[in-house]
Amino acid sequence: MTTVPDKTRITDAALLIGAGIVAACQVGKAFIAMPLIVTDLRIGVDVGSIILAVVALTGAVGAMPVSMLLRRLGARRALIFGLVAIGIGSAIGALATNAPLLILSRGIEGLGLLATVLVIPDLLQQVVAARDRDFMLAIWGSYMPIGTVLMLLLGPALPHIGWRTLWVINGILPIAYAALCWFRFGSGERGPRGSSLLSDIGALFCTRGCLHLALAFGLYSFSYVAIAGFMPLILVRELHFSVAAAGLFTTGAVAANIAGNIGAGVLLRAGVSIWANVAMSFTIYGVASLIIFASGAGGVAIAIMAAFTLGIGGLSPGSIFAAIPRFAPSPTLVTPTVGLVQQASNIGQFIGPLTIGFWAAHFGWAAVPFVMVPVACLGLAVAAGIRSIQQARHE
């Protein structure tokens, strides 16, 4: 049973969110370093895309089963294990002289990232007062864009320090952070063992709220990657921006997403419902896709619209993370619920680029709204489902 403190322990909450940011840096570092990796290892863009995608693929395949194992390992032990695994994976990657070894190291990092981020929402509940829970979990939702932005900001220095140095830094930092977490929180006890794996999975898939949150996060990730992932390509190839300018605009857009996650916490504290935040997010994604991909607007207008879209879009992950503890079948199944939601998110991150890339290659960028708008409409339907669940629970 999770013990809820009367007063939020801000230092502990910040330490836990920081662990998620350290984990998220492993995603962002690959994006910013890929040009150097392709040149150094003499590989093609196709192999480079595998190096980029393997972390998301690990989550798409393993988030749910890993969360079940972590529940039995115990949240604090899982946090420390995850951070150490990230450090080991990054250290192996720094020594890689070929693509297969680097891909293997990325797989280890992906497992470490899962172990880290899946248990943090549960741990946050143990250090955050009930009145601050929604706000703090919404802030937690910004861990991924914060980690990505931190790595993007290193872009100008990367040609001077080299990608291997970046990997070494990202090997030392998680292990040092694991030691800090161990001194602060200890290793804790093993998790509950009262129920079977199949009964836990059945409980999740029989709970409407869990399924709605997972579907909402999957659709959000699909939409997010469609804009954030392809914006540099559109700015450079279609609108003739320099690579540096495109990177700067992309960094600003991702930073706006951080503000959206935090904004979700502010709105939830002000009484705005979870479903309303999710609905606003998908509405802006649907409308903005018409402007970004099909309007023929100039590069600056598109970049500003993308930043605005990712900012409002950030209301979804912040709200979804805030909803997980109340929608989970029981307090002991919070981590598996996070696993289900995270797995859906990674599936969206994996399918999104493939779908949009294929569609644009065959029908042109102006046809992308024919994919984005239906996805947004489906997201609005999921938001309506969340609304009905909240009404039934009198929230």
Image: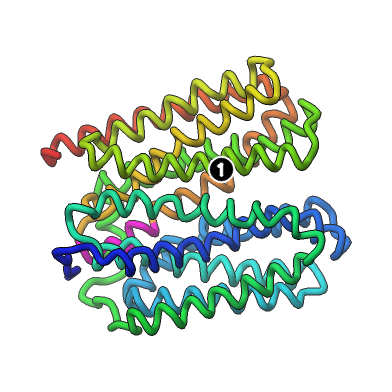
Q: Mark 1 points at which residue?
A: 254
| Residue nearest the viewer, comparing 1 with 120 | 120
| Residue nearest the viewer, comparing 381 with 34 | 34
Secondary structure of the residue carrying tag 1 is helix
Quadrant in the picture for residue 198: bottom left
* Residue plotted at (64% across, 40% down): 250
Residue 361 in the image: x percent, y percent? 74, 30
* Residue plotted at (46% across, 63% down): 20
Residue 217 in the image: x percent, y percent? 42, 44
Quadrant in the picture for residue 185: bottom left
Does the image show residue 224?
Answer: yes
Residue 40 in the image: x percent, y percent? 86, 64
Instruction: Establish if 99 lies above or below 256.
Output: below
* Residue plotted at (50% across, 74% down): 83
Q: Kindly identify the amino acid type of the residue bearing the numbered disc 1.
A: Val
Instruction: Establish if 41 lies above or below 242.
Output: below
Residue 138 in the image: x percent, y percent? 34, 49
How many residues crowd around disc 1 within 10 Å: few (fewer than 14), some, or many (20 or more)?
many
Number of numbered labels in the structure image: 1
Colour scheme of the rendered structure: rainbow
| Residue nearest the viewer, comparing 83 with 372 | 83
Tell me which segment is drawn in magenta: 331-339
Residue at the far left: name it: 394
* Residue plotted at (66% across, 35% down): 231
Instruction: Establish if 227 lies above or below 326.
Output: above
Is 307 placed left or right of 157 in the picture?
left
Does the image show residue 198?
Answer: no
